[in-house]
Image (cartoon, helix red, strand yellow):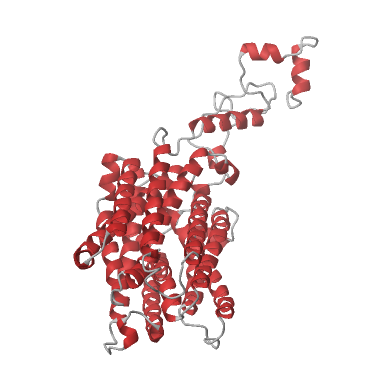
Amino acid sequence: MAAISIRTRLGYGFGHILNDLCSAMWFTYLLVYFHHVLLFDNGLAGVVLLIGQVADALSTPFVGREADRTDDLPFCVRYGRRKTWHLVGCLMVLCAFPFIFMGCLGCGHAHDWAQLVYYAPFVVVFQFGWAATQISHLSLIPSLTQDPNDRTELNAIRYGFTVMSNVMVYLVTWMVLGLDTTPTTEKETGIGPEDAVKFRYIVAIVLVIGVIFVSLFHALVKESNTYSPLSSMQVESSDCNGSTSSSSNSPACTPSPPTHFRMTASDWLKNTQFYQVAVLYMATRLFCNLSQAFIPIYLQDHLHLPEESVAYIPLVMYISGFLMTTVMRALNKYIGRKASFMLGAVVGAAAAIALRLGHGEIYVNYLLYLVAALLGAGGSVMLVTSLSITADLIGPNVESGAFVYGAMSFTDKLSNGVAVVLIQNLNPCVNCCPMCSTYYRDILFYCCGGAAVLGFLAVITLLPAKIGDRKKASLLSTTLHTHTVHGTFPLLSSTHRSSTRPRSAPTRQAHSKTNPLVL
């Protein structure tokens, strides 16, 4: 496969910007918006996020399966199956996402449960579209290149644009939240209901930016649809001299083994590495998403920082993460994927410990920025490397790559949704008070630190094996397929053949009874 052009690399990076902008709003500001602007109950705010995560989790396997189909409509084949799903997903995101941050239109004073019913359909549509965009975009990587270093670079580019998207959201939020300089009692305590209109401005700005980059992605990236669903299982029926043989008595030539065999969903579910990588990916997403979701509430409820802090502290995290993406290719090349992931997990765990121990003016004024940088760097290394490990697991099996990414995302979304709703329901207070001011600090320590440790343990289980190595399974599948086509048995040892052959009948008769395909 030819080297990837700069145009394709840049265009690929543009493809997930809309998703990243909405994801930054979703994970960073959804709970803050429902907590402090809509004044939702803690538990119901968690339910809103859980509905979205469950919808996303259920959508990803479906999207993964459908994006791998080879019998799509002619337009999908010509334009690209994955690009078609990407386009549909983006349209759904644009139609549903704005309503989540616009307040309950016509029911703003209704009970929280009634407003929850209003928000749920928009959340479900948004998350289905988000899943369609994410899975189709990720599954393009194995189709664009088979080179491991190029895959790492594409993942790094993708994460680099993710970081820049988050930086853009935080800059816009910082600018919009800082527009009103009127000091009121409520404003001095942080974000409040009067900031509702500002969140609408923020959403409008980020969606316009997202539309621009989605258009560039579809203009610059061309998806190849040249591979055939049976290309990896073709068996030649010619004889040893290359001529076609129609005689049943002609000896069948043994076809050369293919470079890989087709992996279906059931094949992946029987693969041990599939589950190991799923745990690693789930732990990575737990670390990144929970830190992103609860850092703003930690800043408001525990450290009692100004409302602009929910923009500039996450900004430090993502600038640090972006800087790490610039060295990810070299890091993976020289110390390997597994060692890179372990390094990121150690840095992330160290940041979680620092959050738990940090206090005082020196911490708030200076050390907090260092801790935020460590969180961003650790999450960046873990995320880019886990995506590269997932691409290595897929290997040449691009025909089912979308299913693998869908399954990985299923574990990610479901675990994050369950974690958030549990955290919200275990909150000891309805309103912030001294008793619960340390709650989110401890959540960041135990949950984010625990996720980093879980990822570290998952990658240890992968140390003895080569990720994506399915040579034994490929050989077995090739052998069984070959003998099924030619109507012969797999080669058995002489001892096994003699022990399984009936002694009371001639050899040919016993063989024909056992295998009616042989005449």
Is residue 280 visible in the rendered image? The answer is yes
The one of 1 and 189 positioned closer to us in this rendering:
189
Q: With respect to residue 37, does 366 lie above or below?
A: above
The one of 385 and 395 positioned closer to us in this rendering:
385
Q: In the displayed orientation, state which residue is furthest to the right.
A: 504
Query: What quarter of the picture does the N terminus occupy?
Result: top left
Q: Quadrant of residue 481?
A: top right
The one of 191 and 16 positioned closer to us in this rendering:
191
Residue 380 image offset from top left, x and y in percent: 32, 55
Residue 240 image offset from top left, x and y in percent: 55, 23
Query: What quarter of the picture does the C terminus occupy?
Result: top right
Q: With respect to residue 123, does 4 lie above or below?
A: above
- How many numbered circles does the render carry? 0
Residue 426 image offset from top left, x and y in percent: 49, 64
In the visual, does 146 lie left or right of 62?
Answer: left
Q: Quadrant of residue 357?
A: bottom left
Is residue 6 visible in the rendered image? The answer is no
Residue 399 image offset from top left, x and y in percent: 52, 48
Q: With respect to residue 76, does 305 lie above or below?
A: below
Q: Quadrant of residue 277?
A: top left
Q: Residue at x 54, y 46 (%)?
A: 228
Q: Residue at x 46, y 81 (%)?
A: 38
Q: In the displayed orientation, state which residue is furthest to the front.
A: 435
The one of 46 and 361 positioned closer to us in this rendering:
361
